[in-house]
Amino acid sequence: MLHDFIPFGLGFYFSNHHRIVTYSGALIYNGVVKSLLRAARKDEIAHWDELIATNPAGGEVFQAKAFACIKARQRWRAEYWVYETSFGPVYTLMLSKKIPFLGKISYIPRGPGVIDLRQWREVCRLNRKFMKDAISLKMEPPILCGNIKTLPEDLLHVTDIQGSVAHTVIIKLNKSEDDLWRSFRQRARRSIRGSRKEQLHVVDEGFSHENALHMWQLYKYTANRAHLVTRERKYYYRFWRNYIETGQGRFFFVVKPDSDQPIAGAFVQWSGVNALYKDGGSRRDTCAHFSHLLQWQIMRYLRGRGIQNYDLGGTPPSDRLDDPTERLASLATFKLSFGAPVIDHVGAYDQILQPAKYKRWSRLEHAWRGLMRRTPIRDIY
Protein backbone atom coordinates (compact mmCIF):
# COMPACT_ATOMS: atom_id res chain seq x y z
CA MET A 1 0.00 0.00 0.00
CA LEU A 2 1.31 3.45 -0.94
CA HIS A 3 1.07 6.31 1.55
CA ASP A 4 1.04 10.06 0.87
CA PHE A 5 4.46 10.38 2.48
CA ILE A 6 7.55 8.56 1.21
CA PRO A 7 10.88 8.55 3.08
CA PHE A 8 13.35 11.23 2.04
CA GLY A 9 16.43 10.61 -0.01
CA LEU A 10 17.02 8.34 -2.98
CA GLY A 11 15.42 4.92 -2.73
CA PHE A 12 13.91 2.09 -4.75
CA TYR A 13 10.74 0.28 -3.71
CA PHE A 14 8.90 -2.56 -5.44
CA SER A 15 5.25 -3.46 -4.98
CA ASN A 16 3.45 -5.96 -7.20
CA HIS A 17 6.15 -5.54 -9.84
CA HIS A 18 5.65 -1.76 -9.98
CA ARG A 19 8.79 0.31 -9.66
CA ILE A 20 8.63 3.27 -7.29
CA VAL A 21 11.51 5.75 -7.10
CA THR A 22 11.81 8.57 -4.59
CA TYR A 23 14.31 11.39 -4.81
CA SER A 24 14.52 14.20 -2.29
CA GLY A 25 10.94 13.53 -1.27
CA ALA A 26 9.32 13.41 -4.75
CA LEU A 27 7.57 10.21 -5.78
CA ILE A 28 7.66 8.65 -9.22
CA TYR A 29 5.26 5.72 -9.64
CA ASN A 30 5.33 3.82 -12.95
CA GLY A 31 6.83 6.89 -14.59
CA VAL A 32 4.22 9.33 -13.22
CA VAL A 33 5.41 12.07 -10.85
CA LYS A 34 3.44 12.24 -7.59
CA SER A 35 3.82 15.59 -5.87
CA LEU A 36 3.96 16.19 -2.13
CA LEU A 37 4.58 18.84 0.48
CA ARG A 38 7.15 18.15 3.16
CA ALA A 39 9.03 19.93 5.92
CA ALA A 40 12.55 20.95 4.97
CA ARG A 41 15.36 18.91 6.45
CA LYS A 42 17.95 20.43 8.79
CA ASP A 43 20.63 20.44 6.10
CA GLU A 44 18.25 22.24 3.73
CA ILE A 45 17.41 24.90 6.32
CA ALA A 46 21.13 25.40 6.92
CA HIS A 47 21.53 26.28 3.21
CA TRP A 48 18.13 27.89 2.81
CA ASP A 49 19.18 31.13 1.14
CA GLU A 50 21.08 29.18 -1.51
CA LEU A 51 18.17 26.82 -2.14
CA ILE A 52 15.50 29.49 -2.65
CA ALA A 53 17.67 30.82 -5.47
CA THR A 54 16.99 27.53 -7.34
CA ASN A 55 13.22 28.10 -7.37
CA PRO A 56 11.59 28.89 -10.75
CA ALA A 57 11.48 32.58 -9.74
CA GLY A 58 15.23 32.58 -9.16
CA GLY A 59 15.41 33.83 -5.55
CA GLU A 60 13.29 36.17 -3.41
CA VAL A 61 14.48 38.51 -0.67
CA PHE A 62 11.30 38.10 1.39
CA GLN A 63 11.77 34.33 1.40
CA ALA A 64 15.19 34.57 3.06
CA LYS A 65 16.01 33.46 6.61
CA ALA A 66 16.81 37.10 7.43
CA PHE A 67 13.15 37.99 6.86
CA ALA A 68 12.00 35.12 9.07
CA CYS A 69 14.17 36.49 11.89
CA ILE A 70 12.66 39.95 11.48
CA LYS A 71 9.10 38.64 11.56
CA ALA A 72 9.79 36.49 14.63
CA ARG A 73 9.70 39.79 16.56
CA GLN A 74 6.03 40.03 15.58
CA ARG A 75 5.48 36.47 16.79
CA TRP A 76 5.32 34.87 13.37
CA ARG A 77 6.63 31.31 13.48
CA ALA A 78 8.90 30.44 10.57
CA GLU A 79 8.16 27.15 8.82
CA TYR A 80 10.43 25.88 6.06
CA TRP A 81 8.61 23.76 3.49
CA VAL A 82 9.49 22.04 0.22
CA TYR A 83 6.88 21.57 -2.47
CA GLU A 84 8.04 18.52 -4.42
CA THR A 85 6.38 19.12 -7.77
CA SER A 86 6.40 17.87 -11.34
CA PHE A 87 8.62 20.85 -12.27
CA GLY A 88 11.09 20.39 -9.38
CA PRO A 89 11.29 21.43 -5.72
CA VAL A 90 10.01 24.82 -4.60
CA TYR A 91 11.64 25.90 -1.32
CA THR A 92 9.15 28.02 0.59
CA LEU A 93 9.30 30.08 3.77
CA MET A 94 5.89 30.08 5.42
CA LEU A 95 5.07 32.33 8.37
CA SER A 96 2.36 31.03 10.69
CA LYS A 97 0.43 32.30 13.68
CA LYS A 98 -2.06 30.66 16.03
CA ILE A 99 -5.20 32.76 16.47
CA PRO A 100 -6.96 32.05 19.81
CA PHE A 101 -10.29 30.23 19.48
CA LEU A 102 -9.88 30.05 15.69
CA GLY A 103 -6.77 28.19 14.60
CA LYS A 104 -3.71 28.65 12.44
CA ILE A 105 -3.26 31.21 9.66
CA SER A 106 -0.26 31.13 7.33
CA TYR A 107 1.45 33.55 4.98
CA ILE A 108 4.03 33.01 2.23
CA PRO A 109 5.76 36.41 1.85
CA ARG A 110 6.30 37.18 -1.83
CA GLY A 111 5.86 33.55 -2.69
CA PRO A 112 5.73 30.73 -3.46
CA GLY A 113 8.55 31.12 -5.96
CA VAL A 114 6.61 30.01 -9.03
CA ILE A 115 6.26 31.94 -12.28
CA ASP A 116 3.15 30.66 -14.07
CA LEU A 117 -0.39 29.49 -13.39
CA ARG A 118 0.34 25.80 -14.03
CA GLN A 119 2.98 25.78 -11.30
CA TRP A 120 0.77 27.75 -8.92
CA ARG A 121 -2.16 25.38 -9.46
CA GLU A 122 0.03 22.44 -8.45
CA VAL A 123 1.11 24.25 -5.30
CA CYS A 124 -2.52 25.02 -4.44
CA ARG A 125 -3.44 21.34 -4.87
CA LEU A 126 -0.71 20.36 -2.44
CA ASN A 127 -1.94 22.94 0.06
CA ARG A 128 -5.43 21.46 -0.05
CA LYS A 129 -4.07 17.95 0.41
CA PHE A 130 -1.50 18.48 3.13
CA MET A 131 -2.36 21.69 5.04
CA LYS A 132 -5.20 20.30 7.12
CA ASP A 133 -4.62 22.53 10.15
CA ALA A 134 -4.59 25.97 8.47
CA ILE A 135 -7.61 28.26 8.10
CA SER A 136 -6.10 30.03 5.12
CA LEU A 137 -2.82 30.64 3.36
CA LYS A 138 -1.90 34.08 2.03
CA MET A 139 0.30 34.00 -1.09
CA GLU A 140 1.98 36.60 -3.32
CA PRO A 141 3.62 34.67 -6.18
CA PRO A 142 5.74 36.68 -8.65
CA ILE A 143 3.41 35.79 -11.55
CA LEU A 144 2.59 38.38 -14.20
CA CYS A 145 -1.05 39.36 -14.61
CA GLY A 146 -0.96 38.41 -18.28
CA ASN A 147 -0.19 34.81 -17.33
CA ILE A 148 -3.42 34.40 -15.35
CA LYS A 149 -6.69 33.18 -16.82
CA THR A 150 -8.89 31.01 -14.61
CA LEU A 151 -7.81 30.66 -10.98
CA PRO A 152 -8.69 27.89 -8.53
CA GLU A 153 -12.05 28.55 -6.88
CA ASP A 154 -10.61 28.65 -3.35
CA LEU A 155 -8.35 31.65 -4.15
CA LEU A 156 -9.59 35.10 -3.13
CA HIS A 157 -7.86 38.31 -4.22
CA VAL A 158 -6.99 40.44 -1.16
CA THR A 159 -5.06 43.59 -0.27
CA ASP A 160 -1.36 43.40 -1.17
CA ILE A 161 1.13 42.95 1.67
CA GLN A 162 4.35 43.60 -0.27
CA GLY A 163 2.67 46.28 -2.33
CA SER A 164 5.92 47.84 -3.53
CA VAL A 165 6.57 44.87 -5.83
CA ALA A 166 3.02 44.28 -7.11
CA HIS A 167 3.50 46.93 -9.82
CA THR A 168 7.07 47.78 -10.59
CA VAL A 169 9.91 48.33 -13.05
CA ILE A 170 12.55 45.61 -13.38
CA ILE A 171 15.86 46.44 -15.03
CA LYS A 172 17.56 43.57 -16.86
CA LEU A 173 21.24 43.59 -15.95
CA ASN A 174 22.33 40.53 -17.96
CA LYS A 175 23.83 42.66 -20.70
CA SER A 176 27.04 44.61 -21.20
CA GLU A 177 27.46 47.89 -19.36
CA ASP A 178 27.44 49.76 -22.67
CA ASP A 179 24.17 48.11 -23.72
CA LEU A 180 22.66 48.87 -20.33
CA TRP A 181 23.67 52.53 -20.66
CA ARG A 182 22.20 52.75 -24.16
CA SER A 183 18.89 51.29 -22.92
CA PHE A 184 18.33 54.34 -20.67
CA ARG A 185 16.23 57.22 -21.90
CA GLN A 186 17.95 60.49 -22.70
CA ARG A 187 16.71 62.07 -19.48
CA ALA A 188 18.54 59.48 -17.35
CA ARG A 189 21.80 59.70 -19.29
CA ARG A 190 21.75 63.51 -19.20
CA SER A 191 21.19 63.49 -15.43
CA ILE A 192 24.09 61.09 -14.84
CA ARG A 193 26.39 63.28 -16.93
CA GLY A 194 25.24 66.30 -14.91
CA SER A 195 26.13 64.57 -11.64
CA ARG A 196 29.67 64.05 -12.89
CA LYS A 197 30.01 67.76 -13.52
CA GLU A 198 28.89 68.35 -9.94
CA GLN A 199 31.57 65.84 -8.84
CA LEU A 200 29.11 63.71 -6.92
CA HIS A 201 30.16 60.21 -6.04
CA VAL A 202 28.46 57.11 -4.65
CA VAL A 203 29.83 54.95 -1.83
CA ASP A 204 28.59 51.53 -0.77
CA GLU A 205 28.64 50.79 2.94
CA GLY A 206 28.03 47.96 5.38
CA PHE A 207 25.99 48.18 8.56
CA SER A 208 27.00 50.54 11.35
CA HIS A 209 24.87 52.64 13.66
CA GLU A 210 26.16 55.76 11.92
CA ASN A 211 25.20 54.45 8.47
CA ALA A 212 21.82 53.25 9.74
CA LEU A 213 21.17 56.69 11.24
CA HIS A 214 22.08 58.39 7.94
CA MET A 215 19.76 56.05 6.05
CA TRP A 216 16.92 56.49 8.53
CA GLN A 217 17.13 60.30 8.49
CA LEU A 218 17.09 60.40 4.68
CA TYR A 219 14.30 57.84 4.46
CA LYS A 220 12.14 59.45 7.14
CA TYR A 221 12.61 62.93 5.70
CA THR A 222 11.48 61.75 2.28
CA ALA A 223 8.54 59.77 3.68
CA ASN A 224 7.32 62.81 5.63
CA ARG A 225 7.65 64.98 2.55
CA ALA A 226 5.53 62.52 0.55
CA HIS A 227 3.04 61.99 3.40
CA LEU A 228 3.93 58.29 3.60
CA VAL A 229 3.56 56.40 6.86
CA THR A 230 6.54 54.37 8.08
CA ARG A 231 7.08 51.69 10.70
CA GLU A 232 9.09 52.40 13.84
CA ARG A 233 12.81 53.11 13.44
CA LYS A 234 14.05 49.96 15.20
CA TYR A 235 12.16 47.79 12.67
CA TYR A 236 14.22 49.28 9.83
CA TYR A 237 17.44 49.00 11.80
CA ARG A 238 16.82 45.27 12.37
CA PHE A 239 15.78 44.80 8.76
CA TRP A 240 18.86 46.50 7.31
CA ARG A 241 21.23 44.83 9.74
CA ASN A 242 19.90 41.31 9.18
CA TYR A 243 20.28 41.50 5.40
CA ILE A 244 23.63 43.27 5.40
CA GLU A 245 25.19 40.91 7.93
CA THR A 246 24.04 37.85 5.96
CA GLY A 247 25.63 39.26 2.79
CA GLN A 248 22.27 40.02 1.14
CA GLY A 249 22.09 43.79 1.37
CA ARG A 250 24.04 47.04 1.20
CA PHE A 251 23.72 50.77 1.84
CA PHE A 252 24.55 53.21 -0.96
CA PHE A 253 25.07 56.93 -0.31
CA VAL A 254 25.60 59.94 -2.58
CA VAL A 255 28.20 62.36 -1.25
CA LYS A 256 29.26 65.84 -2.37
CA PRO A 257 32.99 66.52 -2.83
CA ASP A 258 33.06 69.08 -0.02
CA SER A 259 31.16 67.04 2.61
CA ASP A 260 31.14 63.60 4.21
CA GLN A 261 27.40 63.83 4.98
CA PRO A 262 25.29 61.94 2.44
CA ILE A 263 22.70 63.87 0.47
CA ALA A 264 20.84 60.73 -0.67
CA GLY A 265 20.82 57.07 0.22
CA ALA A 266 19.43 53.68 -0.73
CA PHE A 267 19.19 50.26 0.81
CA VAL A 268 19.30 47.39 -1.70
CA GLN A 269 18.88 43.68 -0.99
CA TRP A 270 19.26 40.58 -3.15
CA SER A 271 18.61 36.85 -3.40
CA GLY A 272 19.94 34.64 -6.16
CA VAL A 273 19.84 36.60 -9.42
CA ASN A 274 17.22 39.08 -8.19
CA ALA A 275 17.72 42.37 -6.33
CA LEU A 276 15.30 44.92 -4.88
CA TYR A 277 15.59 48.65 -4.23
CA LYS A 278 13.94 48.45 -0.82
CA ASP A 279 14.36 51.88 0.81
CA GLY A 280 15.60 55.27 -0.32
CA GLY A 281 15.63 58.92 0.65
CA SER A 282 17.24 62.30 0.09
CA ARG A 283 17.44 65.84 1.41
CA ARG A 284 15.30 68.48 -0.28
CA ASP A 285 18.14 71.01 -0.39
CA THR A 286 20.32 68.84 -2.61
CA CYS A 287 21.38 69.31 -6.22
CA ALA A 288 19.27 67.92 -9.01
CA HIS A 289 21.35 65.10 -10.49
CA PHE A 290 21.91 62.57 -7.72
CA SER A 291 18.96 60.17 -8.25
CA HIS A 292 19.97 58.71 -11.60
CA LEU A 293 23.63 58.57 -10.59
CA LEU A 294 22.72 56.62 -7.44
CA GLN A 295 20.73 54.02 -9.35
CA TRP A 296 23.33 53.75 -12.11
CA GLN A 297 26.10 52.98 -9.61
CA ILE A 298 23.84 50.47 -7.82
CA MET A 299 23.24 48.70 -11.12
CA ARG A 300 26.98 48.54 -11.81
CA TYR A 301 27.57 47.11 -8.34
CA LEU A 302 24.85 44.49 -8.77
CA ARG A 303 26.12 43.46 -12.22
CA GLY A 304 29.47 42.77 -10.56
CA ARG A 305 27.71 40.38 -8.16
CA GLY A 306 26.04 38.48 -11.00
CA ILE A 307 22.58 39.94 -10.37
CA GLN A 308 20.39 39.76 -13.48
CA ASN A 309 17.15 41.48 -12.43
CA TYR A 310 16.96 44.74 -10.47
CA ASP A 311 13.51 45.62 -9.14
CA LEU A 312 13.10 49.37 -8.67
CA GLY A 313 10.14 48.73 -6.37
CA GLY A 314 6.79 50.43 -6.62
CA THR A 315 4.80 52.20 -9.36
CA PRO A 316 1.11 52.65 -10.14
CA PRO A 317 -0.48 49.88 -12.24
CA SER A 318 0.55 50.06 -15.90
CA ASP A 319 -2.91 51.29 -16.95
CA ARG A 320 -2.90 54.16 -14.42
CA LEU A 321 0.49 55.75 -14.99
CA ASP A 322 -1.11 59.02 -16.12
CA ASP A 323 -3.51 59.21 -13.19
CA PRO A 324 -2.46 62.27 -11.12
CA THR A 325 -4.24 60.88 -8.05
CA GLU A 326 -1.82 57.94 -7.87
CA ARG A 327 0.64 58.65 -5.05
CA LEU A 328 3.47 56.84 -6.90
CA ALA A 329 2.94 58.62 -10.23
CA SER A 330 6.00 60.88 -9.89
CA LEU A 331 8.20 57.92 -8.93
CA ALA A 332 6.99 56.03 -11.99
CA THR A 333 8.23 58.82 -14.27
CA PHE A 334 11.70 58.55 -12.73
CA LYS A 335 11.85 54.75 -12.86
CA LEU A 336 10.60 54.56 -16.44
CA SER A 337 13.53 56.77 -17.51
CA PHE A 338 15.76 53.69 -17.20
CA GLY A 339 14.08 52.22 -20.27
CA ALA A 340 12.11 49.28 -18.85
CA PRO A 341 8.28 49.12 -18.76
CA VAL A 342 5.99 48.80 -15.75
CA ILE A 343 5.02 45.19 -15.10
CA ASP A 344 1.97 44.08 -13.14
CA HIS A 345 2.02 41.04 -10.86
CA VAL A 346 -1.09 39.22 -9.68
CA GLY A 347 -0.78 40.53 -6.12
CA ALA A 348 -1.93 38.82 -2.94
CA TYR A 349 -4.43 35.96 -2.67
CA ASP A 350 -5.86 34.02 0.23
CA GLN A 351 -6.31 30.30 -0.35
CA ILE A 352 -9.31 29.47 1.80
CA LEU A 353 -8.81 26.07 3.38
CA GLN A 354 -11.54 26.21 6.06
CA PRO A 355 -14.37 28.44 4.72
CA ALA A 356 -16.44 28.75 7.91
CA LYS A 357 -13.48 29.77 10.05
CA TYR A 358 -12.12 32.00 7.27
CA LYS A 359 -15.21 34.21 7.41
CA ARG A 360 -14.54 34.87 11.07
CA TRP A 361 -10.80 35.35 10.49
CA SER A 362 -11.30 37.84 7.63
CA ARG A 363 -13.42 40.08 9.87
CA LEU A 364 -10.87 39.83 12.67
CA GLU A 365 -7.97 40.46 10.29
CA HIS A 366 -9.59 43.63 8.91
CA ALA A 367 -10.16 45.02 12.41
CA TRP A 368 -6.73 43.95 13.66
CA ARG A 369 -4.85 45.54 10.77
CA GLY A 370 -6.84 48.74 11.16
CA LEU A 371 -5.91 48.88 14.83
CA MET A 372 -2.23 48.20 14.17
CA ARG A 373 -2.03 51.08 11.68
CA ARG A 374 -2.46 53.41 14.64
CA THR A 375 0.63 51.99 16.35
CA PRO A 376 4.38 52.24 15.52
CA ILE A 377 4.32 48.61 14.31
CA ARG A 378 1.91 49.60 11.51
CA ASP A 379 0.76 46.13 10.43
CA ILE A 380 0.38 42.54 11.63
CA TYR A 381 2.30 41.36 8.52
Image (cartoon, helix red, strand yellow):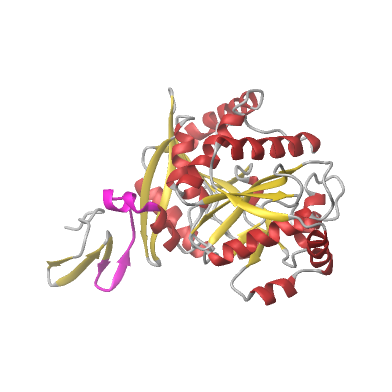
In the foreground, 233 or 128: 233
The residue that appears at 57% across and 47% down in the rendered structure is 349
Number of residue marks: 0
**Quarter location, residue 68:** top left
In the foreground, 210 or 45: 210
Please indicate, yes or no, whether residue 354 appears anywhere in the rendered image: no
Q: Is residue 42 rendered magenta in the image?
A: yes
- Quadrant location, the C terminus: top right
The relative height of residue 117 versus residue 231 in the rendered view (above or below) is below
Residue 99 % position (x, y): 45, 27
The residue that appears at 47% across and 51% down in the rendered structure is 247
Residue 363 % position (x, y): 58, 28
Q: Is residue 148 rendered magenta in the image?
A: no
223 to the left or right of 252: right
In the foreground, 67 or 322: 67
What segment carries the magenta color? 28-48
13 to the left or right of 288: left
Residue 89 % position (x, y): 37, 61
Residue 71 % position (x, y): 48, 36
291 to the left or right of 128: right
The residue that appears at 53% across and 42% down in the rendered structure is 207
The residue that appears at 46% across and 45% down in the rendered structure is 245
- Quadrant location, the N terminus: bottom left
The relative height of residue 55 versus residue 365 in the rendered view (above or below) is below
**Quarter location, residue 212:** top right
Please indicate, yes or no, whether residue 266 appears anywhere in the rendered image: yes
